[in-house]
Image (cartoon, rainbow, N blue to C red):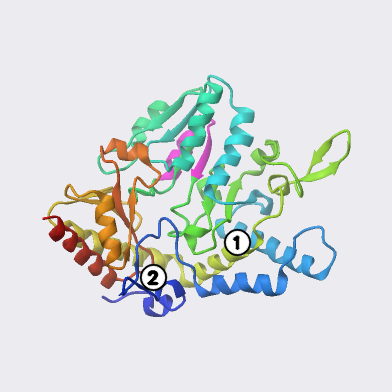
Amino acid sequence: MASSLDVKNIRKDFPALHQEIYGKPLVYFDNAATTQKPRQVIERMIKYYEEENCNIHRGVHYLSQKATEAFENARRNIQQFINAKETHEIIFTKGTTDSVNLVKTSFGEEFLQAGDEVIVSVAEHHSNFVPWQVLSEKKNIPLRIIPVNDKGELIFEEFEKLLNEKTKLLAITHTSNTLGSIVDIKKFIDKAHEHDVVVLIDGAQAVMHKQLDVQELDCDFYCFSGHKMYAPMGGGILYGKEKLLEKMPPFQYGGEMVDQVTIKGTSFNELPFKFEAGTPNVEAILGLDEAIKYLQNIGFDNIAKYEKRLLDYATEKLLKIEGLRILGTSENKASLISFLIGDIHPYDAGTIIDKMGIAVRTGHHCAQPVLDHFEVPGTIRASMVFYNTFEEIDRLVEAIMQVKKMFE
């Protein structure tokens, strides 16, 4: 099949793809869990450790100033990448989970009271479900749940019914990590804002597929992780509107986030530093900066078109397999397929598929509530990105046929 991308050359950038598993070339379809890293990102991290390694901020010597400049340049680049209004609206965190918990603690625990209500969806990753469930139990704040339809799409009309004068926060995914459904979050944000509801978006599964513009969306908070978009683990972003971040107290306490410390008391640093206690994961942030440049060089339009073709091809091939069931059939979907093979347990199938050199994810994908809706304990998930190929999809189909043959 022809491609708008030079996938053969792109794959050369990813060292991890060029290895054998059990004597077979690796097919990596676990990208929704974490993506592989291009050589450019790896080399950027090596450069930091070989030439710039130093604790950032406050240091007057050359290495500290050099590392600090690179770190803060990354912040400016990420601000431009997501089109945030201000650089200090970019808070560096460990990842999406860390970002959501920051908002849960510094906004939720500080400003929400007993009787207020929080809305989440049944399709949330546990990272954007459990924190609000814990807050609900801790402060007697009812947690309202947006259901999904049989296609795995959030039901907007049911969301509208949940909104009332007690609703204070909507925490919602941009793209389901289990079903692949892409949510029309602008529609949800606008409706929530009609009721003066603050909106947090979990964008962990979205930012690697499509260009993001937080001002256009008008969300109040947006969270994502570097490691799902070709960057190192341990680095992530919380975007927050300045007016909210200014009011929120620090999430953690220690170095860097303070202004003055005396025996009598402590005053805190300005944004964004009051939310960045301790030594940050500098190399992860520099790697994220490099990964964004890499994606921009390929072009998000090119990525989206190619990944859509991968999804369509894989869907067509899989649906031809007798007894195979796909969960998540939204028309607007990321390049991710969750499926079951007849009555074969996902773990058993995934283990056999792995022995054929193909990496897929099995289990509940940290999204048990939505799988409970479909009355299944787990699925097999194949998630594809722009370095995957149509030939690799064919290999997955062959592996599934072998699984069926073994269990027959």
Q: Is residue 186 magenta?
A: yes
Dot 2 amino acid type: Tyr
Q: Residue furthest top?
A: 115
Reading the chain from its start, which is encountered first: label 2 or label 1? 1
Nearest to the observer: residue 9 or residue 94: 94
Q: At x 57% / y 63%, what residue is drawn?
A: 288
Nearest to the observer: residue 282 or residue 405: 405
Q: In the rendering, at what x and y percent does residue 351 appear?
A: 29, 58
Classify the position of the C terminus by image quarter: bottom left
Q: In the rendering, at what x and y percent does residue 286 appear?
A: 62, 65
Say if 386 sits above or below 10 in the image: above
Dot 1 amino acid type: Ala
Q: Kindly identify which residue carries mark 2.
A: 387
Instruction: Judge left or right: residue 134 versus residue 375.
Output: right
Q: In the rendering, at what x and y percent does residue 196 appear?
A: 54, 31
Nearest to the observer: residue 38 or residue 408: 408
| C-alpha distance separating marks 2 and 1 | 22 Å
Say if 72 sits above or below 169 in the image: below
Provide the secondary structure element on which disc 2 rests: loop
Q: Residue furthest right?
A: 263
Q: At x 25% / y 40%, what residue is drawn?
A: 150
Mark 1, residues whose alpha carbon is within 10 Å: few (<14), some, or many (≥20)? many
Nearest to the observer: residue 230 or residue 329: 230
Q: Is residue 167 visible?
A: no
Residue span colored magenta: 184-201
Q: Kindly identify which residue carries mark 1.
A: 284
Q: At x 64% / y 50%, what residue is drawn?
A: 91
Provide the secondary structure element on which disc 1 rests: helix
Q: Image quadrant of residue 398?
A: bottom left
Q: In the rendering, at what x and y percent does residue 372 appear?
A: 30, 36
Q: Is residue 227 magenta?
A: no
